[in-house]
Amino acid sequence: TSTGGSDADSVPGEVHEALKSAMEKLQLRFMDLMREKAELKERVEELEHHCIQLSGETDTIGEYIALYQNQRAILKQRHREKEDYINRLAQDKEDMKMKLLELHELVMRLVGERNDWYTKFMMASQAGELQPGHEREAGTQVDGVFEPNASKVADLREVSLADEAELDAVAT
């Protein structure tokens, strides 16, 4: 039964069904591949978007790291300055202790000299050298030693540093 063509151009029904089935399978496979390709393309775009986000976050993290390092350097500098200041204060404290000890020694020497003068004056006044009417001018020298006027020295008293322990406590 020819429909206007030769038998050579016609395909038997079984072959036609096999070709039709193969064509449907190819179409289904092609559709699956196209859908898979579209899904993969979406996935690639999604991953590229994530990469861009991560790149931005990496830049932000880098900025935070730089800021942190800058702040840490500032804190280290402040710490060094504070340590230097503390060291200077400690040195100043030691210097003040030394000066206070030196001052204490000078005061003790001055008090000792004053007591010596007072003792000499008392001995001289008891010996009768400074009798009323025999007073010398204020600040005269006798035997190369300065002797105060008796009227000026009358209110001199013995000095005691009984509170020396208190002064030592201040020195430390």
Image (cartoon, rainbow, N blue to C red):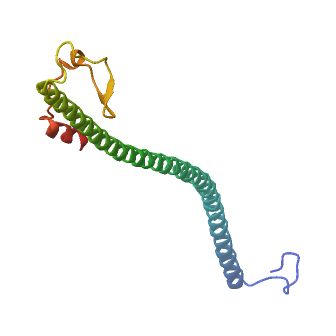
Residue reaching furthest to the top: 133
- Please state, as top left, top right, bottom left or bottom right, where the C terminus lies in the image: top left
Q: Is residue 147 above or below residue 169?
A: above
Total marks drawn? 0
Residue 70 locus on image (x, y percent):
55, 49
Query: In the image, 28: left or right of 102?
Result: right
Q: Residue at x 22, y 34 (%)?
A: 111
Query: In the image, 147: left or right of 43?
Result: left
Residue 119 locus on image (x, y percent):
16, 32
- Please state, as top left, top right, bottom left or bottom right, where the N terminus lies in the image: bottom right
Residue nearer the viewer, 110 or 41: 110
Which of the 4 quarters of the picture holds residue 52?
bottom right
Residue 45 locus on image (x, y percent):
65, 58
Q: Residue at x 84, y 85 (%)?
A: 7
Residue nearer the viewer, 135 or 89: 135
Residue nearer the viewer, 68 or 36: 68
Q: Is residue 29 above or below residue 18?
A: above
Query: In the image, 54: left or right of 30?
Result: left
Q: Is residue 27 above or below residue 110?
A: below
